[in-house]
Amino acid sequence: MAVMEGSLSKWTNVMKGWQYRWFVLDENSGILSYYTSKEKMMRGVRRGCVRLKGAVIGIDDEDDSTFTITVDHKTFHFQARDAEEREKWVRALEETIFRHGSKMRWDVSKPSPTMKDFDQKVSEADAYLQLMIDQTRVSFIFYSN
C-alpha cells in the first residue's frame, strides 16, 4: 500500500544533476520506488527503487528542501519542493524505516505497553530464570553422585 507518493528531484550524478522523478513509498514492502513520470508509474515502468530496511535519513540544516537516504553503503540525494514537503517525506520515510527496522511488526492499532506490562514481563522472566537455576541444581546434584 502506498503511504505517500509525489514528485521529488533525485541527484543522478555530477553530469546530469537533479532529475525530476515520481516517487511511491510502499509501507508494506518498505520500498521507495521511483519513475521518470507519473504516467510511467501508471504504466508500471519503474526506473529504480530504494530498499529502506536499515536506512538512515540525513537532513541538511543549510538547505531546507534536501535530504538523503543512506542504505547498504550507498547515499541517495533528494530535493523536495519546499521545507514543508521535505518534512512530509522525511516523516513518512522514517515511519516506514522504523516499521522495517526489526523483524517484529509494530502494530499501531494496539496500545503502547505500560510500566505495569513491563514489570509483569520482568516478573515472568525472573520466575523462568529461578526455575532454570533450580533445575540446574537438581541436575548437578543428580549427575555428580
Image (cartoon, grey):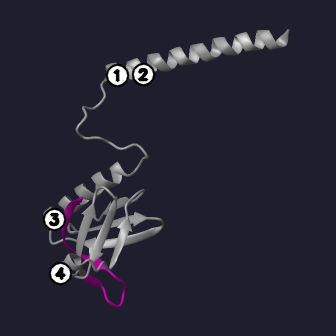
Tell me the magenta residue range. Answer: 1-19
Q: Quadrant of the C terminus?
A: top right
Q: Sequence-wise, which precedes: disc 3 or disc 2?
A: 3
**Which residue is under mark 3?**
85
**CB-based contact (under 8 Å), mark 3 and mark 2:** no
Pointer 4 local density, CA inside 10 Å: few below 14, some 14–19, many at least 20: few
**CB-based contact (under 8 Å), mark 1 and mark 2:** yes
Going by the numbered disc 1, the residue's amino acid type is Asp
Q: CA distance from mark 3 to mark 2?
A: 42 Å
Going by the numbered disc 2, the residue's amino acid type is Lys
Q: Sequence-wise, which precedes: disc 1 or disc 4?
A: 4
Q: Position of residue 11 (x, y in %)?
A: 31, 79
**Which residue is under mark 4?**
39
Asked if residue 140 is positioned above or below residue 118 in the image, the reply reads above
Q: CA distance from mark 4 to mark 2?
A: 52 Å
Q: CA distance from mark 1 to mark 4?
A: 50 Å
* Membership of 11 in magenta stretch: yes
Q: Which mark is residue 121?
A: 2
Query: In the image, is 73 to the left or to the right of 10?
Result: right
Q: Sequence-wise, which precedes: disc 3 or disc 1?
A: 3
Q: Which mark is residue 117?
A: 1
